[in-house]
Image (cartoon, helix red, strand yellow):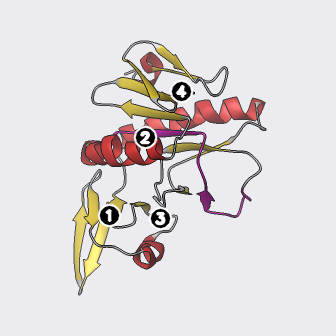
Amino acid sequence: MLTIVHEGNAVELNPDTLIIIEHATLEEYEKLANEDLKIDFDGERIYIHSPATLRHEELVYDILTVCKHYFESHPDLGIPTGSHFAIHLPNDRRPEPDVVVIPAGLISPNESTFHGVPLLVVEVISPSTRRHDLEEKKNWYMENQVPEIWLVDPDEESLTALYLTADGIYDEVSTTTDILASRFFEGLEFSATILFKE
């Protein structure tokens, strides 16, 4: 549960609640951003995510495990990490993807923010963040030409990959039953059937 306290009054929010603070400043974002909260910032709004559901976290864990195994064998290609790691995109958006792969060798282990364009991002869609993930955050990644954007939808049990092409546009592929392979990392693939197993 996420608890908000104001003037001595406390409110507990259910899992999968998204709080949006309008007209926010960078200073306010920096005061709130820490390893205990998952926060996105678009320069005007702060998006605070409440703790995720078990189903959401199991999917994140499964995807991150696949990525960890792959990059253990290909350490020079990138570093995968989870949802409490912030990205500072060139257009000044600051998302925290559920899973992100950043280029190897560009950040030290003690840093908490990657400045630049990640190589791959994965968003696991939650009911409370559906619009935010499928519209705002997806657009932030596309504006910065992230090579691969993966959207995992537990409600639809679908897996969608957006691949940046040489023409600078995205090729979108979705499945509910098949395996989708990365086009940026040869041999990295995700199976919709395995991800959404009962």
The disc at residue 2 is 1
Q: Amino acid at mark 2?
A: Glu
Residue visible at 59% across and 45% down? 118
| Viewer-closest of 106 and 155 | 106
Residue visible at 61% across and 53% down? 116
The residue furthest top is: 178
The residue labelled by disc 2 is 123
Q: Is residue 113 magenta?
A: yes
- Closer to viewer: mark 3 or mark 2: 2
User: Quick one: quadrant of the C terminus?
Assistant: top left
The residue labelled by disc 4 is 165
* Position of residue 126 in the picture relative to residue 63 (left or right): left
Q: Which of the two discs, 1 and 2, labels the residue nearer the N terminus?
A: 1
How far across and down, in percent of the image, does residue 175 sit?
A: 39, 17
The residue labelled by disc 3 is 36
Q: CA distance from mark 2 to mark 4?
A: 20 Å
How far across and down, in percent of the image, does residue 17 sit?
A: 26, 55
Q: CA distance from mark 1 to mark 2?
A: 21 Å
Q: Which of the two discs, 1 and 3, labels the residue nearer the N terminus?
A: 1
- Closer to viewer: mark 2 or mark 4: 4
Q: Which of the two discs, 2 and 4, labels the residue nearer the N terminus?
A: 2
**Element on which disc 2 rests:** strand
Q: CA distance from mark 1 to mark 3?
A: 10 Å
Asked whether the residues under the numbered discs 3 and 4 touch, taking CB atoms below 8 Å apart as contact, a structural biologist would say no
| Viewer-closest of 52 and 48 | 48
Q: Which range of residues does the magenta coloring cover? A: 107-126
Residue visible at 74% across and 45% down? 104
- Closer to viewer: mark 3 or mark 4: 4
**Element on which disc 4 rests:** loop
Above or below, 157 against 72 in this view is above
Asked whether the residues under the numbered discs 1 and 4 touch, taking CB atoms below 8 Å apart as contact, a structural biologist would say no
